[in-house]
Image (cartoon, rainbow, N blue to C red):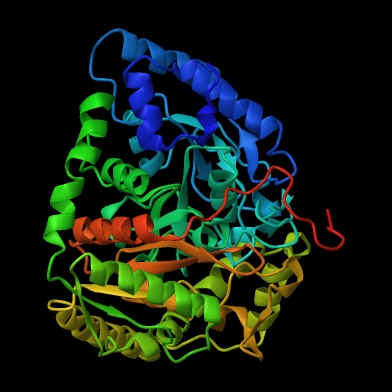
Amino acid sequence: MSRDLTSETVVRLADLMARREASPVEVAEAFLERVGGAGRRLNAVVTLAGDVLEQARAAEHALTKGGAAGPLCGVPLTVKDTLDVRALRATAGSAVRSERVAEADAPAVARLRAAGAVILGKTNCSELALDYTTENPVFGRTLNPHDHTRTPGGSSGGCAAAVAARLTAASLGSDLVGSIRIPAHFCGVVGFRPAGASVPRAGHTPPVVGVYALGASVGPLARTVADARLLYGVLSGEVEGGTNEGIVAGVGQAAQDRRGRLLGVRFCAYEEEGTAPVSDEARAAVGSAARALEEAGLVAVGARPPHVESGAGLWLALISQATARFVREEFAGREELAGPVARALIRRGAGEAGESADELRATLERREVMRARLLGWMETTRLLIAPVGAVAAFRHDEARRVEVAGQSVNTFRAFAHAQVFNVFDLPAIAVPVNRTKEGLPVGVQLAARPGDEALLFAAAEVVERAASAVPRPADNAPQRGANPL
């Protein structure tokens, strides 16, 4: 077959295989060839499953025997290295876990398998998912496919880079402080953060327990909104069966109905949430997305949502002590194995007094009050549009501070927009909209109330259709200056 199968979307691949116009083995071989070729320098896929072709042959058998083959039958997917995949290394980027092999699939991975997906392997992440880069002591650094001197973001940067570079049809990531949406924004792909409990979060490192369970989630990164919707349907259990053909047909047939339901829906677009300035490109992206929604019949409101200016600080206050405690326990007695980010947390935590139970309780109560007020406000203004962060993909040596509008800003502050939707646990999707003068992707994020996911995906499709084309990264991306690898 002459077509480039690695350029096809999840929906299209499922359709091709359902119609017997491509075989799962042929598709798997195409992606394996690309991972071993153009993908090698990116260091995005760090562990390959040894049974990829065996999985593909099983998918082919399911399709040819005429039964229900599952909506993802034969579609090659990757999984972030913070999530367990049976019989594969599960390091979470930590040298302490470098030889750990998972005994079972995380429940979210098991749902993908049950839908017929072929698990290609694992993608790289930051050490213990701690920051907005993708670099760790086990596998090293992942490069942004649009510009190798820049990060793909983190901590799901390996997922985003692999999707953008066509090393996988889509990828499964996780998001605690924007870790799906920021890499999607940096790499020009779609990233969906589900409301926390809608997709199972067991089998993840760090464990999604305690305060993490308030806003951590597991979700897909893909090339299109339609792909993200289909994957979310599988991950959330809403799409359990049916053949490829039935699911794929439904994606297209419902599009017009979804657009019709958007008429008259109120939305709010805002550019700054009070923590850090944003770039001109980020402002332009929000403006473009807002115009697209207005042209589709939605109604813009001027008032800014309540408490978005407090969300990032509140979230960091809630999770900082839990993160420091987890890192200290991870490296107890083996501190020499910690990478730079983990070492800094260990040092800082050694001299800090932990938050008291009363202080934590008060912070949790404040979060509940703010969230209830925001959700109440969103009963009438059902969609929010905001930047994913202050800037596009930053250089590898800018991981601690970035320049925004002439100011030097702490990186976590620069991406406060993303953290807001974690602390209030809103489903949110990042969609590429335009690009910087250097050709780097710029996305926006849309958020809705839990339960309004159908509306959210429909609005994201409107933004996606109206967006300026984000060019596909070349196999030999620009390397401006010496690359440390």
Q: Is residue 73 visible?
A: no
- Residue at the spot 36% in from the left edge and 28% down from the top edge: 14
Would residue 73 appear left or right of 104 to someone viewing this image? Answer: left
Give the vertical position of 255 relative to 24 (above or below). below
Where is 79 relative to 348, above or below?
above
Q: Position of residue 358 (x, y in %)?
A: 36, 90
**Residue lying furthest top in this view?**
65
Residue 184, compared with residue 446, is above or below; it is: above
The residue nearer to you, when weighing 154 against 87, is 154
Res 405 → quadrant = bottom right
Q: Nearer the viewer, residue 32 or 435?
A: 435
Q: Measuring 72% from the left and 39% from the top, which residue is drawn there?
A: 40
Q: Position of residue 50 (x, y in %)?
A: 60, 24
Residue 485 image position (x, y, % from top left): 83, 53
Between 378 and 441, which is closer to the camera in this rendering? 441
> Which x, y percent locates residue 149?
75, 61
**Which residue ends up furthest to the right in the rendered image?**
482
- Residue 128 in view here: yes
The residue most toward the front is 295
* Quarter-of-image position of residue 382: bottom left
Q: Which residue is at a point 42% across and 29% down the rendered structure image? A: 75
Q: Is residue 186 left or right of residue 177?
A: right
- Where, by quadrant of the figure, is residue 383 drawn? bottom left
Placement of 29 over or under 461, stated as above or below: above
Q: Residue at x 17, y 83 (%)?
A: 377
